[in-house]
Amino acid sequence: MSTYLAKRLVYMVIILFAASLLIFCLYALTPGDFISGNIKLTPERKAELREIYGLNKPVLERYAVWMKNAFHGDLGFSLSQQKPVLTLFNQYIWNSFLLAVVSTFFTWLIAVIIGVIAAYKQYSWFDTLVMVAIFAAMSLPSFFIGLFLIKILAVDWKWLPPGGMLTTGSNATGLAYVKEVVHHMTLPVIVMTLLGVGSLTRYFRSNMIDVIKQDYIRTARAKGMKERKVLFTHALRNALLPAITLVGFELPALFGGSLIIEQIFNWPGIGQLYMQSFSLRDYPLLMGFTMLIAVLTVIGTLISDILYRVADPRVRL
Amino acid sequence: MGDLLAIENLKTYFDTEEGTVKAVDGVSLRVKQGQTVCIVGESGCGKSITAMSVMGLVEGPAGKVVGGRIEFDGQDLLPLSRHELRTIRGNDIAMIFQEPMSSLNPVLTIGEQMTEPLIEHLKMSRKAARARAIELIGQVGISRAEQIADSYPHELSGGMLQRIMIAIAISCGPKLLIADEPTTALDVTIQAQILDLLRQFKAESNMSILLITHDLGVVAEMADYVIVMYAGKVVEEGEVVELFANPKHPYTQGLLKSKPVINQRQNELYSIPGQVPNPLELTESCYFHDRCAHCMDICRTREPRLKNVTDESKVACWLYEEAVVHG
Amino acid sequence: MSSMNAELSVNKQASPVPVKSSLWKLSVRRLLKNKLAISGLIVVVFMFALCFIGPLFSPYTDNKIHMAMMNKAPSLKHWLGTDALGRDVLTRLMQAGRISLTVGLASMLLSLFIGLLLGAIAGYYRGIVDQVIMRVADLLLTIPGLPLLFIFGALLSEWKVPTDYRMYMVMLMLSMINWPGLARMVRGQMLSLREREFMQAAVVLGLRDRRKLFNHLLPNLVPLLIVIATLNIGGAILSESVLSFFGLGVMPPTATWGNMIDAANNMIDFQERPWLWVPPGLSIFATVIAINLFGDGLRDVLDPKQKR
Amino acid sequence: MADALLEVNHLKKYFPIKAGLLNRTVGHVKAVDDISFVIRRGETFGLVGESGSGKSTVGRTVIRITEKTDGEVKFRGVDLYGLPAEDLRKMRPKMQLIFQDPYSSLNPRIRVGDAIGEALLDHGLVSKAEVRDRVLDVLASCGLSSYHIDRFPHEFSGGQRQRIGIARALVLNPDLIIADEPVSALDVSIQAQIINLFRKLQETRGLTYLFISHDLSVVEHLCSRIGVMYLGSMVETASRDELFRNPLHPYTKALLSAVPVPIPKLKRDRIVLTGDIPSPSNPPSGCKFHTRCPFAMEQCKQQVPEFRDVGGNHYVACHLV
């Protein structure tokens, strides 16, 4: 493989090592653990459990054990749920992915369309409206807008369910199951789209504005091309190309769940799992989750980097 | 022979934060069939904006043609709808620009960009258009035409790209070619090639050329008729030999004298003092008055009109108004 | 258009204007023409005035429990109603705003200070210093921010930090999360400034390092910093509200907009008494959008090339 | 050569080309490829060439804002590349550079007076009290007014900015001024003003110039000796009169004949070169010009012509001569 990639990979691994150490120490530093928080246990039983889980060993030794296991694909054992962390991740992560992938799709779709139109009509009333809307979307406190929409759409108007993935006690199957899930995910998807669409629309708008000013757009017009063709054949392609670098940055969001949204909508995703485990101080799970996001972030950055180089005009084609 | 292009009293203004800039302010000019007309002037004199106005490519909403007539082939272009104008652009009137490197779309192949106007205006099939494009690439003096058609702009040099731009421009057999500083961004040896190419196509097809440049050397090589612009107005125009031999306007005289010429070394170059006036602060006057060695009282308060001094030349200068000089 | 603009700007400069005007004055003049930015500024000023001056005019600042006045809906006497302890919500909202705005402002200043210092050092000296600083920044950027904040928040709770001090700790936490991004930006800007021709001119002139840094580089960095700083206040206010909402930031009885929304975690308050949690949410929203609009206007004026 | 102010021997500057996902050095742009010349005190040496000829890189490498790859630069007998950083800094006032772009070479946030005066202070050339007087002096000699001293660069036109750039260099009393395309960004009428200023300053102050330009007519007007560059190599150097009267290298001839002359309907025997300038990353073998040379022989493709004196200090690198 190329030296550049090799260098990047080595650096990636080093950063991840450092991150894992930092994450481990931080959690180890946090006082209290799953066992001491459990009032049902006698002091003897607590000491015994600590022994079993190796919690009484020094931090560095515990870290070494944790890392060694992690390399073997074992992120430890969730204390509160009594299941391997990876099993739990596998169980919850796809729910998160579902939410993320649908909202990411809508976010990009809306952002491209609105961004292009606003750019084309720069300085029009529509553009001003879009700009205000963009800033509004970027300024929303996520948890508040979630709660607010639940209150209005679910509690007051009863259009949509307030949370969860299925109605309590439901055992729908097949198409009915799908319908129910779609019904439940509508509200969180709306909120997530709302939260993401602002900055992305702005990105596409400004990209497009830059492109429209280019000399080759003037050339296309001077050739007598139809305005539609100028916009979609000549301008849009150039405006979209740099955006492929963003794809990598979406990675952690796609698989890492959303702590706030899933918590508020009671969505059984990996983010909510984290939030629950946090109050229980279920360290293996918390560390596993944090590490997962760190890994996704690093890989995402790498992908973006590679895509950027691929998209670079001199090597692109 | 009639006029192919007749511009009457064209006014193109730009709204800026500080006020309205009259980039083109009452310009009239004519281009005859088969004639090469050069507009010469320094940056900001409005020569490019004049060309853009003809093409209907003045960028709104800041810039706008606010008055005048642009008559092309007997048809007034200004009232035309966007669609009607589009069928003329790239077809009857073609244009090439200063920066060949940025004037072609980096993500489309040369071939794709060349076939577009052929398909659009001449209704060619994709296949016929490609064959014609390859033929055109050969005509502008580039070998390996097939291969070039499939390459992207960044793979070619500036000189080659300008050749491609010319190929695109002549592809639909335009009656008028507008060339806006076509060689300014190129090296002298390449400039010579491009100018030769333009001359060659003009001779072959009898098209007219409206050439915009700041380089008097290029003007002398290319022009039949010259229009000198200063601060948005035409100050002098005339047949090329006459204009270079007997420049009338003090600005034209200064411009010709201040250009260093090979093998005509002077100890000190003539230089026009001062600088171009701020377009926002113009009041009625001859706009050149504060740089002019012959400035009179009337120059500061009244605008001279463009008038014939001989059959083939016009000048806008109070020095040539009999009534003022002798009255 | 670009060529046209270039031509125009050349001409604009052609005849010297009689007034001496620095780029700053030009920028202010242009900013005043941006309606969105100015309305943003007005809202920001209004929010600050409301929070810092408003309570002076409120008859309900005692923060005591009024059993008789518990959970009253908005009325003429209590414009935004009262809470479970009979306190006036509007007054609490204003007091909470003081904390939220202060935290936002202070944590921005702190992270800006750290980011500027480290970013400038990295960008100016390069080499090994640069490597170390940027690698640490990379590391912090790799670890997801929210979980990190949660850990810090939990630490605060476990260490029993007095609620009065938690506010300062929250500022510190937010700065810890924010500085790497800022440092990276400052460094990038430094590197690109170093390549600018006027910096090469400074080398040719043989200027001393100190002058190059303080007279040439930093003044050109300031516009960008102002823009980033402004936009960062909004982000800090949002982060603080999230933390406080989850009970990991500033804690009651010190009110912030975030922990006021915590009322929504109570089913009855959430469903029946929206006046408890909707006003603080809207306050956050209004403040942040105003700051962002103003910041974007600033960016247009001060840093036109750095769009998006 | 006792009066040599600047001696450049076998100067080379290669820029690595990094490309692709690999970000590996895939080759070198040989911007300057073994160039030697001498500039004597009081003369104006003109360096002409088209884009990619490496003429600007010569200027930047000579003044050491771009590091050389190989070779030697001696200024007043001192090897510039042998100097430690602080000594180099102290040497800097004696050789100054004037940039092509009068817009980007002035710091937009520094007043003109400070921009011109700051180097005086940093080199301890005058006391704080005297700075203003010195700046006013130099402004006047560059054709600017005293009220310009407190203004910011954006309030000036291109021509005025170039005057400021010249004043900034001049105030340090340099021995050598390297001017890198100083008039090519300016309009004709302004260009003449600046060219005259260069000439006037040389007469009054006895300056030595290295004048880099693509415009032969400007170079002819200003320079006493001229070097012609092509693709990183010097192809011909001669005194001005000799070069214009008797150009020997085919490239020089072509260059001279390609310049448009403002005389309409003039019939000239013109050598129009075919083809493009090859890329400096992959220059042709032998004589680099052979791909475009109308007189190229078999020998030119293989053998690099020697750069030699053909009499009267007229150097040329061509097999034909």
Image: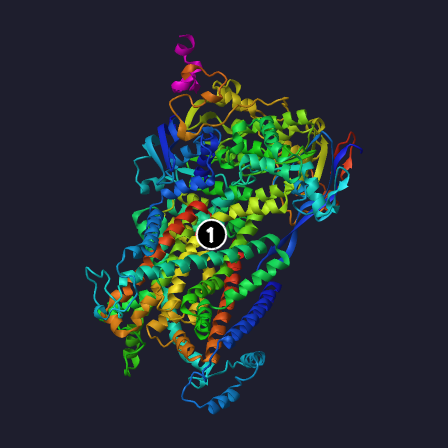
Q: Residue furthest top?
A: B327
Q: Vertical placement of C218 versus D311: above or below?
A: below
Residue D278 is situated, as x and y percent measured from the top left of the image, at 63, 45
Mark 1 lies on residue: B108
Q: Residue furthest left?
A: C76
The x, y position of residue C224, in whole percent, is: 48, 50
Q: Is residue A298 above or below residue B287?
A: below
Q: Position of residue D107 (x, y in %)?
A: 54, 41
Q: Nearest the camera: B266 or D307?
A: B266
Q: Is residue B106 left or right of residue D192?
A: left
Q: Residues within 10 Å of mark 1 (few under 14, many from 20)?
A: some
Q: Is residue C218 visible?
A: yes
Q: Which element type, helix, strand or loop, lies under badge 1?
A: loop
The answer to whether D50 is drawn above or below residue C149 in the figure is above
**Relative vertical location of residue A241 with respect to residue D213 in this rendering, above or below:** below
Residue D279, image x and y in percent? 62, 47
Quarter in which the N terminus of chain A is drawn: bottom right
The residue positioned 75% from the left and 37% from the top of the image is D76
**Residue nearest the observer in this picture, B271 or D316:** B271
Q: To which chain does the residue with label 1 belong?
A: B
**C231 and B156: which one is in front?**
C231
Q: Identify the magenta region.
A: B299-327
